[in-house]
Amino acid sequence: MKQIYLSGLLRMRQVVAFCLSLLVFVSLVFQGNISYAQWTRKADALKKRSECPSIMYKNKIYVFGGFGEYPNFELAAEMYDPATNKWTLRAPFPSGKKVSHQGIVLVDDKIWHIGGRSVDVNGPVTSQVIIYDITNNKWINGPQLIDPATGKALPLGGGGAALIGRTIHVFGGFSPSICVDQTKYHLTLDVDKWKANPSGTKWENKSAPMPLARNHFSTVVLGGKIYAIGGQVKHDCGATELNYVHAYDPVNNSWTRLSNLPAPRSHNEMGTFAVDEKIYTIGGQGPSNVAQKTVFVFNPDANSGSGSWSNATQYTLPNNYFGISGKVVGNKIIISHGAQKSVSNERRETYTASITRNIPYKFGFTAKCFTKSVSAGSKLVLKNLLYTLEGNKTYSLTSNAAWLTITKNASGTAVPTGVNVEATINTSSLAKGSYSATVTAKSTGSGTTYSSASFCVNITVGSSTTGQRVVSFTLINADSDKDIQTLNNNATLDLAKLPTKNLNIRVNTSPSMVGSVKAVLSGVQSLTKTESSAPYAVFGETNYDYNAWVPKLGSYSLKATPYSGASASGTAGTALSISFKVVNSAARLASVVAPQETKIAQPVDLKLQVYPNPSAGNDLQVVLENFADKELVSVVLYDGLGRVAHTKTVETDAAGKGTLVLPVTHLTKGFYIVKAQGKSGSKQTKVLVD
């Protein structure tokens, strides 16, 4: 009887143990620790961080900076190898160069970190560019962001950065301060020119700016275009999340509005990537600063090119994240880091999920067709971008018409970021009429064969070039490549009244395209220049990028002659000659203007009020007075040891007043310092959290 009792008791204990195990399992599921079976926990990263830039190179993921202990930056970089499931530390930021909110671009085996916010979460915005050398695990300095119009440093952060062909594009974001979103700048830099001549190659601002000013948007290159997805406005000054999507076409230098995100998103720049002709955007920050666990997928080919979004619920994240890193390596989506639910809850966890791949082994061209009207006996250069949708592949280009020849990158290796190619139209052997041709890219070499791609060229050849003439000259701003004015005969150019001293002169012809133009400049400076393709620039140009001429003061004569053939060959048309002089009234004024008396600024009675004080765990209300109109003021909460506990930025109203709230519910009891700092000065006060 006793044995039966003991046997029954044992079975009862086993049942109880099983039920307890099941209860613990169910509890864990509902806590979200293992709530999504598609995600598998892998090795934790070595450093916790959020809003951390990341790049995939040769199937390894490199993660930089971000916030490790908000609001402080994490200095160390680290690399994850999915093949071994190991994280390894890499070289940290150089001394004095730590940064967040930077644009990040992979160029060969170098990772460019462009602009951003230095020091800590409070800024300031920086113009620095530093480059991480993957192969040698070291950092080098890159070309500082410079405003081409002023020659001064250009602070820019929270924007987009991308590589198209061999040109880096930087656009959007905030500049010069954190609460000012900008659409003035779309900077570009030719990487190969900079490598060949670092001191002589500068950032240019000649590309169309993003139509809608915003920051913290995701940037992806796919199908020969740059995509700007979501983002926010005003950042620290009452931020609002957005659901806008735009695409930039580098061939036409234009932006297009596409289908909106299903919901507003920001702070998921490094959780957005392109794979298998689609764009994935993971987690991020939604309205009211709420972290998300959604995975949205964009199909750019849907809706006649406007694209469509879907919610990939099969990849719903294991927790709510913003500032998370996400990449695809092989058939795995790999996520890591990010802040979980709140900005100060940075993470180290790494997860993977399987993804069914459908790799598109295809070539493509950004411009599908060109239609041009040209004159007989003339030449015209067409520029296009050849890309792959996935991977790298060797190629060759062919044309099926004798009048259309490939004149740049006729063969090479195509990549997802694109290769700039050129085809030249030569109508010297064509009669008046319409003609069509096709340029085709085909894969070469061993390995996977890629699907061919082509673009068409349709031209209408007009009358012969007899009767061609030069009709006028235009003065050009070589910094912006914009027209300044028509340069008429006997004109006086006052350098003090022009927008720049970096000038050029364009020769305008009738018809607009001729075989060539020969220009002869004489006077204080002399030059002879022949241009065989439009625009016909007296001092030369490359891809409509005008070379700079800084004129000496004095008198000049300019004569330009059109020709029916290239290189001043064939029949000469009607020339045009003008005279002009260059002066500088500022130089004369400077010698007679007396120095003005320097006025000493009077101190400002800044006011800072913080209440309740003491605070029984209630949030602090901060009121600023007597600051400047529309001044950006940084408000920082320090603990008793001088460590930053919280920071915010507020923009004052027209009366110089500003208000904000500092959360203290997460703080321990003790004395704290609230400090307000702006251009008008600083003010601080002590507060007790009880």
Image (tube, rainbow, N blue to C red):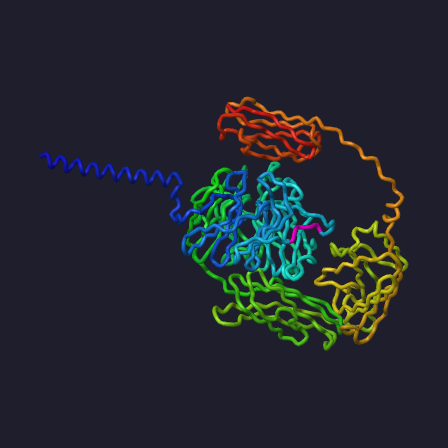
Q: Is residue 210 left or right of residue 353?
A: right
- Asked whether the viewer can see residue 387, the reply is yes
User: Would you identify the image quadrant in which residue 84 lies?
Assistant: bottom left
Please report the residue visible at 74 percent of the width from the left and 56 percent of the height from the top. 481
In this view, the residue in front, 439 or 236, is 236
In this view, the residue in front, 331 or 53, is 53
> Does the magenta run of residues contain 145?
yes
Say if 672 sits above or below 437 in the image. Answer: above
**Residue 474 x/y as whole percent:** 81, 59
Please report the residue visible at 78 percent of the width from the left and 52 percent of the height from the top. 500
Please report the residue visible at 60 percent of the width from the left and 59 percent of the height from the top. 164
Q: Residue furthest front?
A: 95
**Residue 401 x/y as whole percent:** 65, 75
**Residue 590 x/y as whole percent:** 86, 45
Instruction: Specify the quadrant that holds the N terminus.
Output: top left
Q: Residue furthest left?
A: 1
**Magenta residues, start to end:** 143-147
Q: Is residue 103 left or right of residue 499?
A: left
> Does the magenta run of residues contain 166?
no
User: Would you identify the image quadrant in which residue 181 lies?
Assistant: top right
User: Would you identify the image quadrant in which residue 527 lies?
Assistant: bottom right
